[in-house]
């Protein structure tokens, strides 16, 4: 019983400890780092599920670190929202760990692999630490763990551009973290506490204080930088494009989501919703910005020729959806936003994993390289199709579920003019995704040679028609994510139940 | 007028801190040199530390190390936070420097403009390669 | 109305999907592969027919599948209208399957497996549209039709086919997301439900204080969203889609796809808004005028087409508007006529396309001007062609007469006598673009160098087209089941 | 008075670091900046922080930067007048200046409501910290309250801090080390 | 810039004999001070972090004076890598021990070391040592990796 009670801290300390152990034991067996990473992330996933179940039963878990009572010590406060995000993050981490072996073997120098896995674990630990904690300064500390790890992971990319992308991210990420630090400073000056629950109690009396306003402004800007909200997204495309495939997967699927979580927690958990709406029009500003993000992100994505860069810009657009749903601040939209955290993690994770498979097999990152790929990698391309349709928001995929809720939420908020924005985002993503899907199944011909068919009706092989699929260790996890894209698209009741509870809780 | 003077008198510490922060931030944003950016960001962060420490100061307080009863102590919590923040700052600097060294090794420069120029060259070269590849493909089939 | 719960509708929808799996497995054995298609079409037809007695008894069959979101179910509800459409589509699928086999083998098409897979998916989705119990299910299968037929339109993979498919996708997917989905959002937001009701959801929700502007905008979005119905100006995809193999044009662009669009429009008018509400808002008559416009203009365009399939395509655009026109009259006879026209046009147009395909398969002729004297070479085909075109013109004793008759009655009931002129003009135009083909085929001399020896397409192609031609004939003499069903639809509205 | 002097010096240092074209000098000035900052921290009774700032900011950071400089370039690129007057360069300068001024203005706006410098009644000094001062010796048996909070009440943050350092170490190894055993 | 010269063990290095002797002389004292700082964090300013940095600095000083290779002879890369991990493990391990002893994570008072006071005191000592080890060796590692010139470094 005792250990179950301590699960909230074990989910952080165990991966942290093993991240530290990985470099020590790597010299014994080459595969050991990967085995540890997979096992431990699986453990985290199981733990997060059990935490989720506990939360659903009891409402809220509070764990006092060091046994100190909350406003004095650090508290782990797990409620519906972070239990949900924690489950998403640990699940994606587990799937990506399973996937990572072959891809890392190919893309990372052998002697760097143990350090790579160590950093990878630290990255995940940092993200989970941000999610689980109930202390605002602790968020900063874990944010920095994950950020530092993230910089190094991105810099592992094969091209030298990765270094520059990583450096740009480092500068912007550090400015963001310092902004958050300033926000913490102001809010601490105003209230004298760092505990989120305590802040929530003490802040309403201070809503007229200019310090609190400034703190909110700095939190918003800092977190927007971290989660790559539209005009502050500049670091993201480069980072996702040049990072190794595995890193792109894990970052696209989890890092920005955790940023969104932190934003939700701080804007809605710390500052109450009444404050956001009545005292400064931060909600309105964010609605405008996120609408721009939806349109601009998708529009930029259309212009790309590099597959990963296209997906990165598409992430910028999708983050717009999440933020838009959140700042509409009604139950339907908030539910949509929270469930889109899961949904986008699933589909973007699947898409980046597909790119990883393609890179593993062919080394191609260009969109034009996918021409006629359905013969060569039918399963991978099927996953791409499923996840792509999901991005387009086609019904029976997860993309539809979140869009539905956000749109209904926009209408409930009386903002019918957001419907065209949401729809346009969908249509634009249809443009960049469908274009590729068509090329995959109906290859465009290279100039200068005619279509040729054999008697049986199949096309004469060109260089791509040879069946050559990625190894199963990569394909399996990828297909699992795609399957979930469909499963949660057909029956979204389970995640919706949690997302709705989280939304209700945030909007109280 | 008196208000402003009073404001400056009572809060000059914070104002200087903000000035320092902005100097650091400006260096970070506007400089085109990678190391200069790091210097800027260090100044920025250290100024934020001063903000925390200034806020922890209590009039007639002493350092928060217990030595006698009935003494006024400064607020120890910001000190603790800043200890952590300093560590974070030096870690970031170390990683950034490692990146810069690698960038210099790959590009031979630590100026953003130089790097951009080289990236552009890379891209052009890639496009040329791609064209060549396309020509190869069409000639083969 | 009594409700019967049954899983037969689900089975009917899923049968083609199961066939897909088998088709993939037997990819390399053409005979076995095609026999699965045939078997699936027969089973499906059997399943649908088995539901017919229940419906004719005045009962409704319901089949719940899954709850996607709270309030958003995938659910089937089969009423007279649904079974009417499903019966038509599934019967014609049997014939089309045979015809397809003949066609792809004669022409030695590539990627036959993909062809049959997509065909099966499309028919499955069509049945889904026919059976759906709410707007969400409808939308779902509506999109599924778009995706599955895309591959068929792009089948030839030539630049032309890619271009046509692109237009196809932009129109069908673009409008359905931009307008139909928005309209569904608005509907759900305003009424809290998407389940079709006999009086219309919006009529039921009238008490909630919906403004007229809101209703008009929503209705406009709905109509603009169902571009499969090919109302002008959303018709441009249909002629472009003629790059597809002819069986696809025949079945999908005369029956499944376009009729799904029409069917959705009918559902929107009858079960989403309700005839009373539309009459009150005077939207019915606006829609009727739009339909009349499309009817006349596209007929005129059809006159100028030399490509046979293009002419048939524009004719389809015109004929589809008859259906919308009839429903928009909002009178019992008008609705009966428009529903009848669904099946009558389906039989007529599929015959015409089958003939066009047969001509192409044998002689590789695609232009009207090349058809001189072809009746001598292909008598069966051209007789069938003549019957079908006479039916579409509306000459008794052929099916077309019945629907036109009811439409005219509807116009009179609606008190819009001037519009009757539209019917007359459009019928004349129909005659103008169909009869010259018949005339050329039978009464003109063959061009030089061609002999008048019999040269029919293979039996697999000729038999289906003769059967459908007989169908158009029999619809006049024994329209009972279809007419009964159409009348039940009208009766159920109140 | 001495406080004001120190603040003045430190502002001058920051400005110099900004304009120095010789990166080595800039680094040295950054070290001086850190060291004076440590002095100010001492003046403000933050002895632990001052200690750390002196050893880390003035010591380790400077050493690392000089090491990095030795492997890269010592001088910042000297833009010619023409290059400096290019619209893009001017635009960057104006934009960053604008951003910085806005940020600064917002921060100053926030200080209006801030408790006065050294105010013992400030909420920051009233809510959580009194317990640390009153109870730490009893609860953690430490004389140094900062250590008590650091390792006791907020010991978990310190674990995080150690992890950050560890992460930085592994990151640097990952980025710079060539072969695992040489 | 003496350490750069130190790295290349050439003859002009011998001119820096004063530096060498002074640093050799000071190193133990600095290290002693470092241990003092780590151990007396509870009474005065200082603690694991500051002490660790000073400990690291002493070795950095040695390396600057005697060169990379000499430094590596005294402290192998393998050993310092192990120490980096050890520090964090000590810290986390003490936390987990607290859980095993029936308390919350890092609740030192629950450690079975006699009185609560003593347990808490020793617990804090333990983690300070952990922090110190990690910090010292990370600083050394970072310095080694950053300052080490490579053959293919471009000359500026």
Image (cartoon, rainbow, N blue to C red):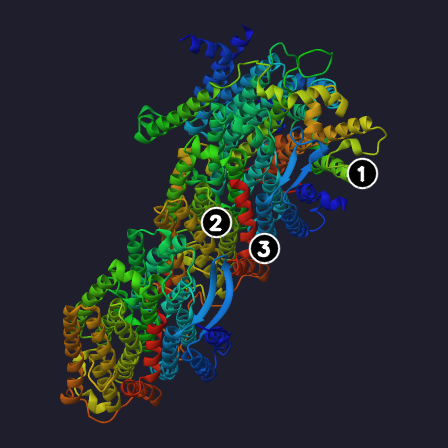
Residue C84 against residue E141 in the figure, above or below:
below
Q: Nearer the viewer, residue D163 or B16?
A: B16
Q: Find residue A362 and report its horizontal and vertical position in percent.
A: 48, 58
Q: State which mark lies toward you, 1 or 3.
A: 1
The residue lying at 68 percent from left, 26 percent from top is D150
Asked whether, in this view, residue B67 is left or right of residue A282, the answer is right
- Which residue position is annotated with label 1? E101
Compute the Cα span from label 1 to label 3: 38 Å
Dot 2: few (<14), some (14–19), or many (≥20) neighbours within 10 Å? many
Q: Find residue C111 and report its horizontal and vertical position in percent.
A: 40, 74
**Chain containing mark 2:** A
Asked whether, in this view, residue A21 is left or right of residue A293, the answer is right
Residues tagged 2 and 3 counted as in contact (Cβ below 8 A)? no
Dot 1: few (<14), some (14–19), or many (≥20) neighbours within 10 Å? some
Q: Are marks 1 and 2 on the same chain?
A: no
Q: Is residue D159 in sight in this rendering?
A: yes
Q: Find residue C69 and report its horizontal and vertical position in percent.
A: 49, 57
User: In terms of sequence position, does the residue under pointer 2 or pointer 3 come before the other?
Assistant: 3
Q: Nearer the viewer, residue C412 or C139?
A: C412
- Which residue position is annotated with label 3? A99
The residue lying at 82 percent from left, 26 percent from top is E118
- Which residue position is annotated with label 2? A336
**Secondary structure under badge 1?**
loop
**Chain containing mark 3:** A
**Secondary structure under badge 2?**
helix
Residues tagged 1 and 2 counted as in contact (Cβ below 8 A)? no
Residues tagged 1 and 3 counted as in contact (Cβ below 8 A)? no
Q: Find residue B133 and report its horizontal and vertical position in percent.
A: 39, 57
Total labels drawn:
3
Asked whether, in this view, residue C226 is left or right of residue B52, the answer is left
Residue C197 against residue C215 in the figure, above or below:
below
Compute the Cα span from label 2 to label 3: 29 Å
């Amino acid at each position: 019983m005792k250990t179950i009670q301590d699960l909230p801290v074990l989910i952080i300390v165990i991966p942290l400890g093993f991240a530290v152990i990985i470099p020590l034991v790597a010299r014994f067996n080459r595969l050991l780092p990967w085995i540890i990473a997979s096992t431990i992330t699986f453990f985290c996933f199981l733990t997060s599920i059990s935490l989720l179940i506990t939360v659903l039963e009891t409402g809220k878990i509070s764990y006092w670190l060091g046994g100190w009572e909350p406003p004095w010590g650090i508290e782990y406060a797990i409620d519906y929202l972070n239990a949900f995000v924690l489950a998403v993050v640990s699940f994606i981490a587990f799937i990506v760990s399973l996937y990572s072996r072959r891809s890392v073997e190919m893309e990372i120098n052998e002697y760097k692999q143990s350090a790579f896995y160590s950093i990878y674990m630290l990255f995940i630990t940092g993200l989970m630490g941000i999610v689980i904690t109930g202390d605002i300064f602790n968020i900063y500390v874990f944010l920095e763990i994950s950020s530092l790890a993230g910089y190094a992971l991105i810099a592992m990319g094969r091209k030298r551009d990765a270094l520059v992308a990583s450096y740009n991210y480092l500068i912007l990420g550090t400015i963001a973290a310092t902004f958050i630090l300033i926000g913490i400073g102001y809010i601490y000056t105003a209230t004298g506490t760092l505990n989120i629950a305590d802040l929530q109690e003490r802040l309403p009396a201070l809503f007229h204080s200019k310090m609190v306003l400034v703190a909110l402004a700095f939190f918003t800007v800092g977190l927007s930088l971290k989660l790559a909200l539209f005009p502050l997204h500049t670091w993201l495309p480069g980072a996702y494009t040049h990072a190794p495939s595995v890193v792109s997967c894990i970052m696209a699927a989890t890092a920005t989501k955790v940023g969104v979580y932190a934003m939700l927690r701080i804007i809605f958990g710390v500052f109450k919703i009444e404050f956001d709406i009545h005292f400064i029009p931060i909600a309105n500003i964010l609605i405008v910005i996120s609408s721009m993000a939806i349109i601009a992100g998708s529009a930029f994505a259309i212009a790309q020729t590099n597959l990963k860069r296209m997906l990165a810009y598409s992430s910028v657009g999708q983050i717009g959806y999440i933020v838009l749903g959140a700042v509409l601040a009604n139950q339907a939209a908030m539910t949509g936003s929270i469930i889109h955290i899961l949904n986008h993690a699933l589909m973007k994770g699947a898409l980046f994993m597909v790119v990883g498979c393609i890179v593993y097999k062919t080394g191609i990152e260009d969109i034009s390289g996918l021409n006629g790929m359905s013969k060569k990698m039918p399963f991978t391309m099927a996953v791409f199709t499923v996840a792509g349709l999901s991005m387009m928001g086609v019904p029976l995929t997860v993309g539809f579920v979140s869009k539905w809720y956000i749109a209904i939420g926009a209408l409930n908020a009386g903002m019918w003019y957001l419907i065209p924005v949401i729809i346009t985002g969908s249509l634009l993503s249809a443009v960049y995704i469908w274009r590729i899907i068509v090329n995959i199944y109906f290859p465009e011909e290279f100039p200068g040679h005619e279509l040729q068919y054999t008697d049986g009706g199949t096309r004469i092989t060109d260089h791509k028609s040879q069946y050559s699929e990625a190894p199963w260790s990569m394909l399996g996890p990828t297909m699992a994510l795609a399957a979930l894209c469909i499963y949660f698209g057909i029956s979204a009741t389970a995640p919706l139940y949690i997302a709705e509870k989280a939304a209700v809780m945030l909007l109280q | 007028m008196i208000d402003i003077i009073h404001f400056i008198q009572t809060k000059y510490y914070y104002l200087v801190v903000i000035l320092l922060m902005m100097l650091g931030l400006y260096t970070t944003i506007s400089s085109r040199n990678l190391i200069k950016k790091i210097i800027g960001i260090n100044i920025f962060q250290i100024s934020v530390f001063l903000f925390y420490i200034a806020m922890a100061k209590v009039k007639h307080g002493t350092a928060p190390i217990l030595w006698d009863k009935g003494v006024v102590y400064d607020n120890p919590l910001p000190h603790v936070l800043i200890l952590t923040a300093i560590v974070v700052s030096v870690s970031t600097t170390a990683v950034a420097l490692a990146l810069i060294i690698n960038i210099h090794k790959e590009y031979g420069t630590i100026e953003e403009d130089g790097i951009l120029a080289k990236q552009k060259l890379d891209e052009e070269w890639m496009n040329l390669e791609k064209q060549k590849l396309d020509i190869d493909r069409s000639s083969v089939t | 109305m009594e409700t019967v719960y049954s899983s037969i509708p689900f089975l009917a929808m899923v049968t083609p999907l199961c066939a897909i799996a088998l088709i993939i497995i037997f990819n390399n054995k053409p005979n076995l592969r095609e026999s699965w298609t045939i078997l699936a079409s027969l089973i499906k037809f059997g399943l649908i027919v088995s539901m017919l007695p229940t419906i004719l008894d005045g009962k409704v069959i319901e089949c719940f599948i899954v709850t996607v979101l709270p309030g958003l179910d995938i659910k089937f509800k089969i009423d007279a209208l649904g079974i009417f459409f499903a019966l038509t589509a599934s019967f014609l699928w049997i014939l089309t399957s045979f015809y397809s086999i003949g066609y792809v083998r004669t022409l030695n098409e590539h990627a036959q497996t993909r062809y049959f897979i997509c065909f099966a998916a499309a028919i499955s989705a069509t049945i889904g549209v026919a059976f759906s119990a709410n707007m969400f299910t409808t939308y779902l299968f509506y999109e599924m039709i778009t995706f599955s037929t895309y591959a068929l339109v792009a089948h030839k993979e030539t630049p032309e086919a890619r271009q046509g498919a692109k237009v196809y996708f932009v129109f069908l997917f673009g409008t359905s997301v931009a307008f139909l989905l928005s309209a569904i959002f608005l509907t759900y937001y305003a009424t809290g439900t998407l389940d079709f009701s006999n009086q219309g959801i919006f009529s039921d929700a009238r008490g909630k204080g919906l403004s007229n502007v809101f209703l008009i905008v929503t209705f406009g979005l709905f109509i603009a969203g169902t571009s499969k119905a090919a109302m002008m100006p959303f018709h441009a995809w249909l002629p472009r889609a003629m790059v597809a193999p002819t069986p696809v044009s025949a079945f999908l662009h005369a029956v499944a796809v376009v009729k799904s669009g029409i069917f959705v429009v009918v559902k929107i008018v009858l079960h989403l808004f309700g005839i009373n509400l539309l009459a009150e808002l005077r939207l019915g008559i606006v829609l009727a005028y739009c339909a009349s416009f499309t009817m006349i203009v596209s007929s005129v365009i059809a006159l100028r087409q030399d490509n046979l399939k293009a002419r048939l395509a524009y004719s389809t655009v015109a004929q589809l508007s008859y259906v919308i026109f009839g429903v928009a009259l909002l009178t019992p006879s008008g609705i009966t006529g428009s529903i009848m026209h669904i099946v009558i046009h389906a039989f007529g147009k599929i015959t015409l396309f089958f003939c066009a395909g047969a001509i192409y398969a044998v002689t590789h002729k695609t232009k009207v001007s090349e058809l001189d004297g072809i009746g001598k070479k292909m008598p069966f085909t051209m007789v069938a062609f003549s019957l079908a075109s006479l039916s579409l013109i509306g000459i008794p004793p052929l099916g077309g007469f019945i629907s036109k008759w009811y439409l005219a009655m509807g116009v009179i009931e609606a008190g819009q006598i001037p519009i009757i002129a539209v019917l007359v003009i459009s019928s004349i135009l129909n005659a103008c673009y169909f009869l010259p083909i018949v005339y050329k085929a039978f009464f003109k001399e063959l061009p030089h160098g061609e002999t008048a020896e019999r040269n029919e397409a293979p039996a697999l192609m000729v038999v289906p087209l003769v059967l459908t031609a007989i169908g158009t004939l029999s619809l006049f003499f024994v329209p009972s089941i279809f007419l009964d069903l159409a009348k039940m639809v009208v009766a159920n509205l109140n | 008075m001495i406080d004001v002097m120190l603040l003045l010096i430190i502002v001058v240092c920051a400005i110099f670091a900004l304009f120095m074209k010789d990166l080595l000098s800039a680094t040295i000035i950054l070290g001086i900046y850190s060291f004076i900052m440590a002095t100010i921290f001492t003046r403000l009774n933050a002895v632990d922080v001052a200690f750390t700032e002196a050893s880390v900011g003035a010591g380790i950071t400077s050493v690392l930067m000089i090491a990095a400089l030795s492997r890269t370039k010592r001088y910042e690129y000297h833009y010619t007048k023409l290059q400096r007057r290019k619209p893009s360069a001017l635009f960057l300068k104006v934009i960053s200046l604008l951003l910085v001024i806005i940020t600064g203005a917002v921060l100053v706006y926030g200080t209006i409501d801030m408790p006065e410098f050294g105010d013992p009644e400030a909420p920051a000094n009233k809510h959580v910290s009194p317990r640390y001062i009153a109870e730490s010796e009893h609860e953690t048996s430490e004389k140094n309250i900062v250590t008590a909070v650091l390792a006791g009440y907020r010991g978990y943050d310190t674990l995080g801090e150690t992890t950050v350092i560890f992460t930085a170490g592994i990151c640097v190894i990952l980025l710079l080390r060539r072969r695992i055993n040489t | 810039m003496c350490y750069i010269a130190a790295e290349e063990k050439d003859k002009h290095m011998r001119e820096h004999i004063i530096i060498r002797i002074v640093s050799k002389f000071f190193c133990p004292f600095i290290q002693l001070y470092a241990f003092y700082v780590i151990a007396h964090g509870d009474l005065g300013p200082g603690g694991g972090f500051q002490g660790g940095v000073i400990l690291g600095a002493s070795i950095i000083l040695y390396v600057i004076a005697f060169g990379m290779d000499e430094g590596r002879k005294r402290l192998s890369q393998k050993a310092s890598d192990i120490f980096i991990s050890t520090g964090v493990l000590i810290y986390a391990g003490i936390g987990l021990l607290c859980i095993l002893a029936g308390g919350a994570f890092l609740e030192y008072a629950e450690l079975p070391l006699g009185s609560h006071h003593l347990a808490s005191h020793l617990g804090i000592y333990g983690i300070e040592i952990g922090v110190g080890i990690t910090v010292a060796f990370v600083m050394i590692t970072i310095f080694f990796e950053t300052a080490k010139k490579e053959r293919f470094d471009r000359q500026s």
